[in-house]
């Protein structure tokens, strides 16, 4: 990683309100970004909104707005939700930014001058919801879009084309040379099958007005997917005023996206970069869908989950933990009220929240609120903490967010077991066992601190409160800060109420 880490989410289409599916990609990316900040890496986290295309213009017209009025309103809602979620993104790009538009045009002129863009005629089945063309063999019965199940329309246009087929061998060579370019591995195999049958693609639209004008032919606008994909390299050119970060940041270390946009990112995107004489990203991580009632969340089908009520009732950390823990990163997973509350009560309230409260309370009761000196007799827990740090770091190096959460939770479970096994309340009754009591109290304090630091990427607000409670506050708790003995002599501060109050009713 060379001491830096550049991570991106897909940019979200502003035809509708943000929902849990959008939150999932972005929260998982935020967890990874925070982890790399904990490692001390210079980290840049990009997200934003995709604001051009025929679908946007139609959605705006239906609401009696201009496309710009519509995109301003919906993009602002995404930014407001990301603020509510406390996301740590370093920049929020909009494809209507004039700097982005100018850079898109500059890159396309380079491709046109090289001869990689030419004019031709095209006819194909087009889905407005996807802003994508499909081959007839890809459609559902009845000429329906394979993603949305809506009727597609036959579109014939004279457009500008990108010589994607000329990059077939280079793409296959990229896959061969870098078997982790697309993760999980079965998604790389899927990308390979697409590349083997790839044809040249249209990169402009003649009958759409809401988009980036093709610089050498203003009767056309840039196809929305090409415009959107280029955001990952346009953003570094102006994210920091007066400074171009491209040389420092590119190539991106990992780009997080859902499986429905694999073709665009694993095939078209690296080919565009090769044509522009730029390196492909180092890795793409493809996650599954958040499901409700067995169906993918989608505005088109009306099957959505609004995350805001969950945040308002249970807190953003509860939502972050549930998404990371319940839905295995890289696979489809169901979002259910029952599952949410079960995770919240059993893990957050009973195991972690209760652990922090009990440890702080016992130190307050038995040692006047000050963590005692360490008698030095708990090598087993010291070893366990070291192992957990190494395990979390290893699995997050492969972007396995769900397994990383489990690795941390092994420590939380063990700490709860230690409370019951060593029974500090019994030791406190026997002055002759004061040394044993000191040992269990300092061990629990050290364990809580280590767990809170490792949990910070997942639940930053609650982890920060736990660190304050154990007397070791930190705005950015580094993994290197997990050193045994850091809590000795600190004064604990009882939390203002439980970290995660239990709930009984349904969400």
Image (cartoon, grey):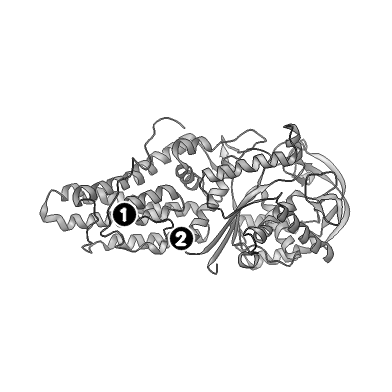
**Nearest the eye: 353 or 47:** 47
Left or right: residue 190 compared with residue 507? right
Q: Quadrant of the N terminus?
A: bottom right
Q: Residues within 10 Å of mark 2 (few under 14, many from 20)?
A: many
Q: Residues within 10 Å of mark 1 (few under 14, many from 20)?
A: many
Say which element carries label 1: loop
Residue holding disc 1: 471
Name the residue located 50 percent from the left edge and 45 percent from the top edge: 323
Image location (x, y in percent) of residue 377:
22, 63
**Nearest the eye: 46 or 196:** 46
**Nearest the eye: 1 or 491:** 491
Quarter residue 343 falls in: top left
Q: Which mark is residue 38?
A: 2
Image location (x, y in percent) of residue 244:
65, 64
Name the residue located 73 percent from the left edge and 50 percent from the top edge: 225
Left or right: residue 197 compared with residue 16? right
Image location (x, y in percent) of residue 326:
48, 44
Left or right: residue 344 compared with residue 156? left
Say which element carries label 2: helix
Left or right: residue 246 compared with residue 419? right
Disc with the residue nearer the chain's start (2 vs 1): 2
Question: Could one spot residue 257 in this view of the protein?
Answer: no
Quarter residue 389 falls in: bottom left
Question: Could one spot residue 386 in this view of the protein?
Answer: yes
């Amino acid at each position: 990683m060379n001491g830096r880490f550049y991570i991106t989410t897909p940019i979200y289409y502003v035809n509708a309100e943000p929902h849990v599916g959008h939150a999932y990609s972005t929260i998982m990316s935020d967890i990874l970004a925070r982890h790399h900040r904990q490692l001390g890496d210079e980290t840049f986290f990009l997200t934003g909104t995709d604001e051009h295309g025929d679908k946007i213009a139609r959605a705006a017209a239906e609401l009696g707005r201009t496309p710009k009025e519509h995109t301003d309103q919906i993009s602002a809602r995404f930014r407001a939700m990301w603020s509510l979620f406390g996301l740590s993104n370093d920049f929020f790009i909009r494809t209507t930014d004039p700097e982005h538009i100018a850079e898109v045009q500059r890159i396309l002129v380079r491709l046109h001058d090289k001869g990689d863009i030419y004019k031709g005629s095209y006819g194909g089945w087009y889905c407005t919801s996807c802003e994508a063309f499909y081959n007839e063999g890809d459609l559902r019965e009845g000429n329906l879009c394979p993603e949305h199940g809506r009727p597609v329309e036959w579109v014939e246009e004279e457009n500008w084309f990108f010589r994607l087929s000329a990059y077939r061998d280079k793409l296959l060579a990229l896959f061969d040379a870098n078997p982790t370019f697309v993760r999980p591995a079965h998604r790389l195999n899927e990308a390979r099958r697409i590349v083997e049958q790839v044809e040249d693609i249209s990169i402009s639209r003649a009958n759409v007005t809401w988009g980036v004008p093709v610089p050498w032919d203003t009767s056309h606008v840039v196809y929305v997917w090409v415009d959107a994909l280029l955001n990952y390299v346009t953003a570094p050119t102006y994210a920091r005023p007066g400074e171009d970060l491209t040389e420092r940041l590119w190539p991106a270390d990992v780009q997080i996206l859902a499986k429905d946009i694999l073709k665009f990112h694993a095939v078209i995107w690296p080919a565009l970069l090769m044509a522009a004489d730029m390196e492909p990203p180092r890795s793409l991580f493809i996650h599954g869908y958040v499901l409700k009632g067995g169906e993918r969340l989608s505005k088109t089908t009306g099957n959505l989950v609004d995350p805001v009520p969950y945040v308002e009732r249970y807190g953003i950390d509860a939502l972050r933990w549930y998404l990371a823990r319940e839905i295995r990163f890289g696979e489809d997973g169901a979002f259910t009220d029952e599952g949410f509350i079960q995770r919240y009560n059993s893990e957050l309230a009973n195991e972690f929240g209760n652990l922090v409260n009990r440890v702080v309370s016992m130190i307050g009761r038995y040692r006047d609120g000050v963590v005692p000196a360490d008698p030095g007799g708990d090598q087993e827990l010291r070893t366990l903490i070291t192992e957990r740090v190494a395990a979390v770091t290893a699995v997050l190096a492969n972007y396995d967010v769900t397994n990383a959460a489990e690795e941390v939770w092994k420590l939380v479970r063990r700490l709860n077991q230690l409370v019951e096994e060593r029974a500090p309340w019994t030791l406190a009754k026997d002055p002759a066992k004061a040394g044993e009591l000191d040992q269990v109290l300092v061990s629990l304090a050290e364990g809580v601190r280590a767990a809170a630091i490792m949990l910070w990427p997942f639940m930053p607000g609650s982890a920060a409160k736990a660190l304050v409670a154990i007397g070791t506050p930190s705005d950015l708790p580094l993994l290197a800060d997990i050193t045994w003995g850091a809590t000795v002599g600190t004064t604990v501060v009882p939390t203002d109420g439980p970290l995660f109050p239990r709930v009984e009713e349904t969400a």
